[in-house]
Image (spheres, rainbow, N blue to C red):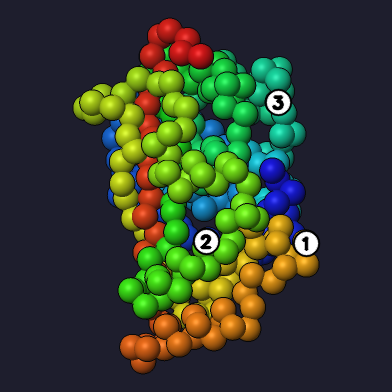
């Protein structure tokens, strides 16, 4: 699905939310060792940068070269362009050796994956029995009642242009296949709720919308989702309280588990 994000790579890097420290602190508290992380579908490195502040080394893999061009560079992050289809041999050559990774992370990307094949790779690369996989998504932004009502109608209009995988995000990853054991101290694998916030003006909010894969798909089909009348509706709702900048909240839903000793897939 890399092609869906290639053309708007710059918008994606600028508009997409970062993730809160509480999310990474929670994940790190479940990993006994903090030597090596594999951040899959790293995009422009939003998660990799935060992980690099906690773990010794981070390998961020991405199937879109244009996304990697906008990734933040740090000494302990190695970014790696990979094919969308990797064999175990590819994994060993490009990512890490067998049973050498403490944590596999997937931020806002796992719903695109061929999960049975991906989980085989996860189980091969993670340390046994305490290696951890953490996958999260964020759902639609929340601003205030006025803006959110306009957004709700707009989001419904955009649905035909989303890939069916988006349904897993709308379901907060509750129904995504996740055959792993609960991490220590938890009764299940989630989803666990977090949130991230950004201060945005309306133009930044529109930039976020234009970074959607559905927006690009619609555009290719000759459909402008942000029509003049839609923009006017957003402007009226946004300016109703007289404040140009607003706190925009993105709910985050985390699935987290450990690989254990036995193969789960």
Q: Which residue is mark 1?
A: 220
Q: Residues within 10 Å of mark 3 (few under 14, many from 20)?
A: some
Q: Nearer the viewer, mark 3 or mark 2?
A: 2
What residue occupies the far bottom of the structure in this picture? 242
- Rendered-image quadrant of the N terminus: top right
CA gap between label 1 and label 2 equals 19 Å
Q: Nearer the viewer, mark 1 or mark 2?
A: 2
CA gap between label 3 and label 2 equals 35 Å
Q: Is residue 39 visible?
A: no
Q: Is residue 103 above or below residue 226?
A: above
CA gap between label 3 and label 1 equals 29 Å
Q: Which residue is mark 2?
A: 156
Q: Position of residue 151 (x, y in %)?
A: 47, 69
Ranked by sequence position, the earlier of labels 1 and 2 is 2
Marks counted in the figure total 3
Q: Is residue 185 above or below residue 160?
A: above
Ranked by sequence position, the earlier of labels 3 and 2 is 3
Q: Are marks 1 and 2 in contact (CB under 8 Å)?
A: no
Image point (44%, 51%), residue name: 138
Q: Quadrant of residue 90?
A: top right
Q: Which residue is mark 3?
A: 86
Ranked by sequence position, the earlier of labels 3 and 1 is 3
């Amino acid at each position: 699905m890399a092609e869906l994000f290639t053309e708007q790579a710059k918008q994606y890097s600028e508009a997409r939310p970062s993730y809160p420290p509480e999310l990474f602190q929670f994940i790190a508290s479940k990993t006994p060792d903090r030597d090596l992380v594999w951040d899959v579908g790293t995009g422009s490195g939003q998660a990799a940068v935060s992980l690099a502040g906690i773990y010794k080394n981070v390998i961020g893999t991405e199937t879109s070269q244009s996304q990697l061009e906008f990734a933040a560079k740090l000494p302990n992050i190695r970014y790696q362009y990979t094919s969308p289809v990797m064999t175990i041999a590819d994994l060993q050559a490009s990512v890490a050796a067998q049973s050498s990774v403490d944590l596999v992370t997937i931020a806002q990307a796992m719903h695109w994956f061929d999960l049975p094949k991906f989980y085989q790779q996860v189980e091969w690369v993670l340390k046994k029995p305490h290696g951890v996989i953490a996958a999260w998504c964020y759902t639609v932004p929340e601003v205030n009642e006025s803006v959110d009502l306009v957004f709700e109608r707009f989001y419904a209009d955009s649905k035909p242009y989303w890939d069916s995988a988006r349904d897993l995000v709308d379901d907060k990853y509750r129904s995504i296949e996740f055959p792993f054991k609960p991490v220590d101290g938890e009764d299940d694998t989630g989803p666990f709720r977090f949130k991230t916030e950004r201060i945005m003006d309306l133009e930044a909010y529109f930039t976020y919308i234009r970074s959607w894969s559905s927006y690009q798909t619609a555009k290719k089909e000759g459909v402008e989702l942000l029509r003049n009348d839609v923009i006017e509706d957003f402007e009226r709702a946004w300016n109703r309280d007289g404040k140009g900048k607003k706190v925009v909240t993105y709910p985050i839903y985390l699935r987290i588990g450990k690989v254990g000793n036995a193969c789960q897939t």
